[in-house]
Amino acid sequence: MPADWASRVLRWQAVHGRKDLPWQGTQDPYRVWLSEIMLQQTQVVTVRDYYARFLQRFPDVRALAGATLDDVLALWSGLGYYSRARNLHACAAQVVQVHGGAFPRTAALLQTLPGIGPSTAAAIASICFGERVAILDGNVKRVLTRALGFGADLAAGANERALWALATELLPQRDLAHAMPRYTQAVMDLGATVCLARKPLCAACPLAEVCVARREGRPESYPVKTRKLKRSAQSLWLLWAQTRDEAVWLRQRPTPGVWAGLYCMELFDSFADLQAAVPLAYRDRLQELDMFTHVLTHKDLHLHPVCVQLPARTKLSPEGGWQAADVWPRLGLPAPVRKLLQG
């Protein structure tokens, strides 16, 4: 491994690293944690606005812990992967109740909190507290496997642990309070802006001279991971029921499951099932809208909205209820449902 790896990365970061992101330039663990959770499986351009709105509503961990889960889910609506929001709320509560409102200062203790895995814990501990621990998110895996020529299959846990050990060896050795935050940000920036999954910008990379994948002329061959996610598809019919004064019938989705914990229209596996749930006198008033597809990580949802106006006295299920026109916009709604209701 190159002896000057860390210094190469740090020099590059000082000149070329990203410095305009709203969560950079802070060592506040609350803000770093919030950004790390939001950035999981989500692009920076999407996270920016959500991050700003979250901080405005919940400026610190005590404010977040004191909120209701419905408030958190409502603000998260549209960001996807809603288990992150549930873990975010649970984590804030635990930080306040168990740790007196102060985040633990080591990666090992941070991992005991809900929703914080090894890489997220390392990011918080290294950036905020200067701990010498390595992150290993998707971008960093790509940088390391290419530069080191690490061709072992990361679908195997033992190989991922071996890569993590190498990542740890490459960390800065001195002035950790200053070097670790910069180094951690640098390797994330390299993966996000230079060592791209397709068409990497090798000429701009500080590791180009020592990069095995570049020397081999096949950077896109790394990282190696043979296990592929199997996609599936599901068709669902959504009963969009409204009253004359535009209250909407919604019920909170069960956990676990699709859109767990969010408020949603009644869902059915077929039009016939939906029809059977509507009072007989109103079944001929059902209006089918165009089907559209909502893409989840492992599944395509083919959604069939069906509209109907019902009296406010109607009860479609024991679990649901009518939400007034000035109430439902503040609830945690799945993105496609919110889009439908907002027209």
Image (cartoon, grey):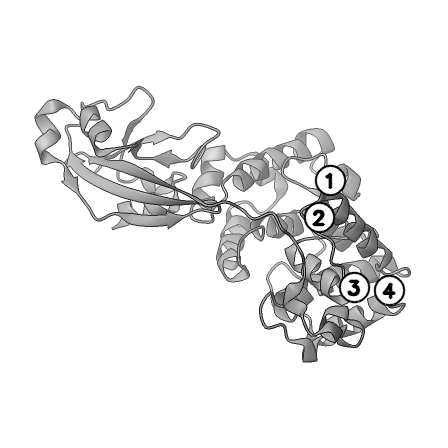
Query: Which circle marks residue 119 in the picture?
Result: 2
**Mark 1, secondary structure of its residue:** helix
Q: Nearer the viewer, mark 3 or mark 1?
A: 3
- The disc label shown at residue 148, or none: 3
Q: Are marks 2 and 1 in contact (CB under 8 Å)?
A: no
Look at the numbered disc 4 and give the secondary structure of its residue. Answer: loop
Q: Residue at x 53, y 46 (%)?
A: 229
Label 4 or label 3, whichever comes before in sequence order: 4
Task: Please tell me which residue is depicted at 67% across the width and 62% down the height of the picture.
Answer: 222
Residue at x 32%, y 44% (from the top left corner):
302
Labels 2 & 4 near each other (Cβ < 8 A)? no
Tell me, yes or no, whether the two marked residues, 4 and 1, touch with CB atoms within 8 Å. Answer: no
Within 10 angstroms of label 2, few (less than 14), some, or many (20 or more) residues? some
Q: Secondary structure at mark 3?
A: helix
The answer to which of marks 2 and 3 sits earlier in the sequence is 2
Task: Give whichever of discs 2 and 4 has the lower sequence position.
Answer: 4
Q: Position of residue 155 (x, y in %)?
A: 67, 47
User: Which one is nearer the viewer's eye here, 15 or 329?
Assistant: 15
Above or below — where is 169 with respect to 247? below
